[in-house]
Each structure stands twice: as structure tokens, then as C-alpha cells.
Image (tube, rainbow, N blue to C red):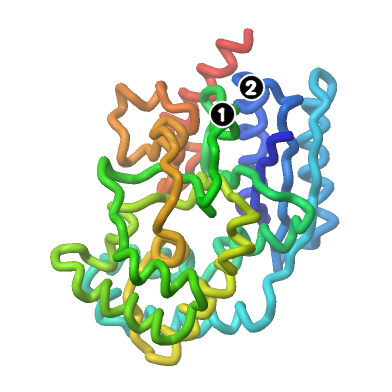
Amino acid sequence: MNNLFFCCDEKYIKFINNVIFGLTKYNDISLFTLNFIVSSPNVSFDILERKITKTINKYNTEHSIKYTIREFILPQEVKEQLDKLSKLLKKSPLFDIHVKDKQKKRAISIFSNPGNWVRMFIYDIYPELTCGLYLDLDILINGDISPIFENDYTGYAIGAVPTCKEKQKLNPTIISKIQASGNVDGYNQLIDFIKTCGDINPADFNNISYNCGVLYLNLVEWRKRNITNKIFGLLNHIISKTELLFTSGTDLIMNIIAPDYFELDGTYNGIVKYTLRKSIFKQAIIHFKGCQDIQENKLYKIIIKNAIRIAE
């Protein structure tokens, strides 16, 4: 069974319908189990669970969709970390230099939003599962995604689409130190490496690596490498040193902690702002990363209408 993971809150739950729509039009839905992780401090789990179930039931007249819905509350110590990080972000010279004034409020909100960090705990929320594909909800499925599950991910914790033609590789010695124990010396060497990246700007590090909105997760390898604990160990180190080395949050931390990844075909994460318009309809997964008012986006509407036309 091919597992899909979605992290939901009251803001993004409205996109579930369109994601399922594309999934059912271009894929054999019987091959998938949809796993929804609900984490929302402002709306009760029961309310959001009912909304997800209602959406799925719309499709169950024609399909028999297998799904789970689980609640996850971010640990208090992680919430405190994110609060400290957002304060650090506001004072960071790096932030002042690389983020435009009109974008700062939104950037801080995204960086410290607990929902953006829930994916780090999938290994623990679903202890019985060994693998699956995590998808942001600001995507549309525009083709067959089942080939993603046919790859051999042995030795890789992550499968992802690089956001440039050439993947940036960290020094193997540094990788081995981080993967070995995540000790402070390893983090210090990592920080030294980032500072010596020449013309690679820490604020743009993910632009030459991979985006975390579409991630194949080898949860066996993830647990083996203890990746989540290392991520938050790095955050603690940054907080204790009060030196923010990047401004884009989860993407960069994932790139730093798990830089060696299985490269997925580029059609599985066609980020709109990085993809030529004439190529966008060839993408199996279209990602509206960074787009505001997505449901009012002209391209978003066109893709949905195209799927409806095909369905008819």
C-alpha cells in the first residue's frame, strides 16, 4: 500500500478537496492510503476531523478511499524553541539583509508556524509505517504519482526533487559526523562549513538543494539516523549561540541534516515560480509554494478546470 501524508490545520484544510480530486482523476486510488495529521491550536480536532471525513465521503460514492486521521500536538519544548527562534529572526542581521521589509511579517509567521514542523514527527505519529510520501496541501496532482513508490530508497532517508540542475553536496566528513551522533562538535563543523560556502548564501541554501513540500520518507532510515532529534538539536545550538544562519526554516534544516537524498524526477515537484509556464502542465505534481490566495490564482483554476475536462 502506498501511504500519503498530509499535515492539516484550519488554514489548509480547504485544499484537501482539490488534492483528492487530482489524485482520483490521474491515479488508481485503491493503491493509496491517505494519512491526515491534524495539528491546530485554534480549532478543535473533532471539527477538523469531521470536515476531512465529509470531503472524503464526497468521493466515496465512486471510490473506496482508505484513510486515517490522527491528531498531533507539538511538544511544548518545541513550541518554546520556535518562539525563541522567531525572536532571534527579528533581530538577525541576515534577516534584515535578505528579506524585504514587506515580506518580513509573513516570513516570521511561516518560520514559527508549528504546522510547518509537524512533518518532522511523522515517524513517531505513525510508528507502524515504514515509508510514505509527504505532500504539502498547496499542491495539485496533475498526473500519475505511483512511480515514486517503485524506486529503491535503500540507504536514503529522503527522496526529493532538487530545485536546481545540480545538487549541492555537503562534505562527506561533516555528513558522517552529523549522522553519527549529532554532537555539538558536529554542529560546529557544519556551521563553519556553511560560513565558508563562498558565494552560497545561507539564506538561499535551499535554492540549490531540494524543496520539502514533496518528500518521500524512508521512515526506517529516518529513525535509524535519529533525524528529528538532530534537527531540534541544531535549533537548540543556534538558539544558545544566538546566531541565526538562515531565514527559511524547515527547508534549510532538512537540507543541512539530511543532505544526501534520492533524486526524484523533476515532474514530481513543479514549483510554479521556478517552472516555465509552457512546461507546467507536464508536471505530475504542481506546487504553488510561496503563492498567496492560491484558490484565486489563475493557473490554479485552469489546472482544476483541465482535470474536470479530462474527467468528463
| Sequence-earlier tag: 2 or 1 | 2
Q: Which mark is residue 275?
A: none
* Label 1 Cα crowd, 10 Å radius (few <14 / some 14-19 / many 20+): some
Q: Is 185 above or below relative to 95?
A: below
Rendered residue at 26%/65% (across/down)? 100
Q: Residue at x 42, y 50 (%)?
A: 211
Extreme residue in the left direction? 199
Quadrant assignment for the N terminus:
top right
Instruction: Residue 92: give x, y in percent of width and height.
Output: 31, 82
Say whether residue 149 is left or right of residue 178.
right
The reply, left or right, for residue 132 in relation to residue 289 is: right
Which residue does the numbered mark 2 point to in the structure image? 27
Percent of width and height locating residue 119:
60, 58
**Kind of residue at badge 2:** Asn
Question: Cβ–Cβ below 8 Å for labels 2 and 1?
Answer: yes
Crowding around mark 2 (Cα neighbors within 10 Å: few <14, some 14 to 19, many 20+) is some
Position of 41 relative to 24 (above/below): below
| C-alpha gap between disc 2 and disc 1 | 7 Å
Residue at 40% x, 80% y is 186
Q: Quadrant of residue 60?
A: top right
User: On the rendered structure, is 68 left or right of 162?
Assistant: right
Residue, disc 1: 145
Q: Secondary structure at mark 2?
A: loop
When the figure is inspected, residue 36 is found, relative to residue 43, above or below; the finding is above
Q: Nearer the viewer, residue 148 or 57?
A: 148
Q: Amino acid at mark 1?
A: Ile
